[in-house]
Image (spheres, rainbow, N blue to C red):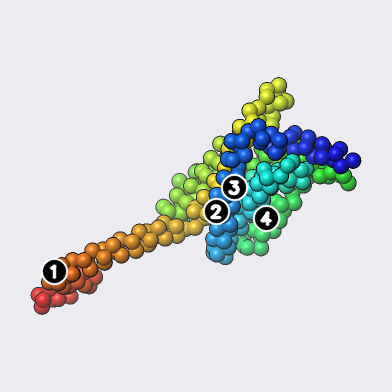
Amino acid sequence: MAQHNVSINDSTASDHGLPQHGTWENDYAELVFIRVLSVVEIPVMILTLIGLCFIIKSQHAASVFVSNLILSDLIQVICLLIAASTTSSTLYLTVEYYYSLMVGLYFMACVAFERYLLVSHPIWYRSHQSLKLSCFISVIVWFVLLIFAIICPHCFNFNHLSMCIACLIPYPIIILCFAGTCRGLSRSISLTALQRKLILGSLFLVLLTYTFLILPYVIMVFMPYVGIKPHRYTRLPMYVNPLADCFLYMFIRSDVRNMMKSVCCCRRHQSSNHNQDERAVVNPQNSCCTVVCCISAQKPASHALNTCSSV
């Protein structure tokens, strides 16, 4: 009976495309790729989640949706890493992996739709936006995908057709939101140039991630229905998807550019102070002149002239 259950689990995992330990023994490169990528992705996603927790009050909807997106990606990476480390891919890991994958795609659509509302309907967005509404929508997204699952007393699974349909639904939503946002940005006068770049950049990243990292795998699942055998390396770009989603954090924070500028200014200021100290040791008179000039540059022009004349 136990052997029969193992065979069912292994066949289910292979039908969905989740690699098994037996196949990885013949493909050591994919095993190493997954393990190395997981070591990089897990710390990055944890740090991103911590950073999102600090801005969740100031950026209600976007930060909540991106936080759930990164959380679903973290579940994917953990399931994939466990599957790569065990002797066989169980049915539980297969369901968890593809369920979190589909949930992440719907949160990508939520991010795109939220950015579209911010640009095209700013008055309605600001009057209806709330943290409770964002959390309520997130809970709905986590449970709405259960309608695509096969639930019975002995099984909880996703077949090929239902999984492909669930993965394809967010794609036209993302495309329409990207096109509508591009049109809305050309007519929006309430947004600054930096805000427009951040909004457009986040939508472009979501569209780019889905098109080049997720869509090839969805096409691969459809290939057996038309008599084409997909290549096993087609699923490799999908493993990079969690790392690409972490870059959304940079577009959610509106002060990223200011933070980078402040870091660069601090480094320049420290290097300039170090050079001034070295010059002061070599020639104290030049050091005094440099200090006086710096003080005069920070004061008003009239006061600076009086200071220079007195010196």
State the image coordinates of residue 106 (x, y, percent, origin top left).
65, 46
Relative height, residue 218 to residue 243 (above, below): above
Query: Which of the two discs, 2 and 4, labels the residue nearer the N terminus?
Result: 2
The answer to whether any part of residue 177 appears in the image is: no
Tell me the distance, in whole angstroms, between the alpha carbons under discs 4 and 3.
25 Å
Q: Secondary structure at mark 2?
A: helix
**Residue tagged 4:** 138
65 relative position to 97: left or right? left
**Residue tagged 3:** 38
Tally the marks: 4
Q: Residues within 10 Å of mark 2 (few under 14, many from 20)?
A: some
State the image coordinates of residue 82 (x, y, percent, origin top left).
69, 47
Q: Are marks 4 and 3 in contact (CB under 8 Å)?
A: no
Q: Secondary structure at mark 1?
A: loop
Mark 4 vs mark 1: give the one in front: 1
The answer to whether any part of residue 237 appears in the image is: yes
Amino acid type at circle 2 is Val
- Label disc, if present, on residue 283 of the rendered structure: 1
Residue at 13% in and 69% down: 283
Tell me the distance, in whole angstroms, between the alpha carbons under discs 2 and 3.
10 Å
**Residue tagged 2:** 44
Query: Which of the two discs, 2 and 3, labels the residue nearer the N terminus?
Result: 3
Query: Which of the two discs, 3 and 1, labels the residue nearer the N terminus?
Result: 3
Q: Are marks 3 and 1 in contact (CB under 8 Å)?
A: no
